[in-house]
Image (cartoon, rainbow, N blue to C red):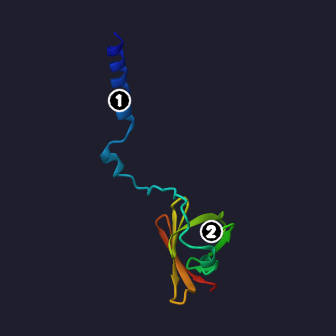
């Protein structure tokens, strides 16, 4: 007697779960870009290498972007915004831990940084060192 009741409950639970999950066609119509948390891994850029990236950058929208480090962690801060942690994903590329902001620094062959391109969600801004 227990087997038919358990089987009926299992079928009902499966049907309920199928109703609450979007169909495959529903997921392709989303306009918003999902954000991903970036997993903290061993940094690809050492604190000594990061010194080249630190400083103030004048963005083409008139704001300033500050790049800094504290306790072997790297941060970016746009004017009027809270500081956000960034992680290296390549020798000259960083992403915020929430995955919404990506930065690519422009470096000359000698390693000096002249600027960067930042993409925040779907908007892109260009910034230059201390202009």
Q: Measure the alpha-carbon separation of dots 1 and 2.
A: 45 Å
- Asked whether 45 or 13 is in front, the reply is 45
Q: Secondary structure at mark 2?
A: strand
The label on residue 115 is none
Q: Quadrant of residue 16?
A: top left
- Which residue sits at x=52%, y=84%? 107
Residue furthest right as drawn: 71
Q: Is residue 79 left or right of residue 34?
A: right
Instruction: Give the residue number, with chain letter if any, for mark 2.
Output: 74
Residue at position x 35%, y 52% in the image: 29
In depth, the one of 38 and 30 nearer the eye is 38
Which class describes the residues within 10 Å of circle 2: few (<14), some (14-19), or many (20+)?
many
12 is higher (above) or lower (below) than 56: above
Residue 14 vertical placement versus 27 (above, below): above
**Most distant residue in the top direction:** 1
Q: Earlier in the sequence, mark 1 or mark 2?
A: 1
Q: Residues within 10 Å of mark 1 (few under 14, many from 20)?
A: few
131 to the left or right of 12: right
In the picture, the quarter occupied by the C terminus is bottom right
Label 1 sits on residue = 14
């Amino acid at each position: 007697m227990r087997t038919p009741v358990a089987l009926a409950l299992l079928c009902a639970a499966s049907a309920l779960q199928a109703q609450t999950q979007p169909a495959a066609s529903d997921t392709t119509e989303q306009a918003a870009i999902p954000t991903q948390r970036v997993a903290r891994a061993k940094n690809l850029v050492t604190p000594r290498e990061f010194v080249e990236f630190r400083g103030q950058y004048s963005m083409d929208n008139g704001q300033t972007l500050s790049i800094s480090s504290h306790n072997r962690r790297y941060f970016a801060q746009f004017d009027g915004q809270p500081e956000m942690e960034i992680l290296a994903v390549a020798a000259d590329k960083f992403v915020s831990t929430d995955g919404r902001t990506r930065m690519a620094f422009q470096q000359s062959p000698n390693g000096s940084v002249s600027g960067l391109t930042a993409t925040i969600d779907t908007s892109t801004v260009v910034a230059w060192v201390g202009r």
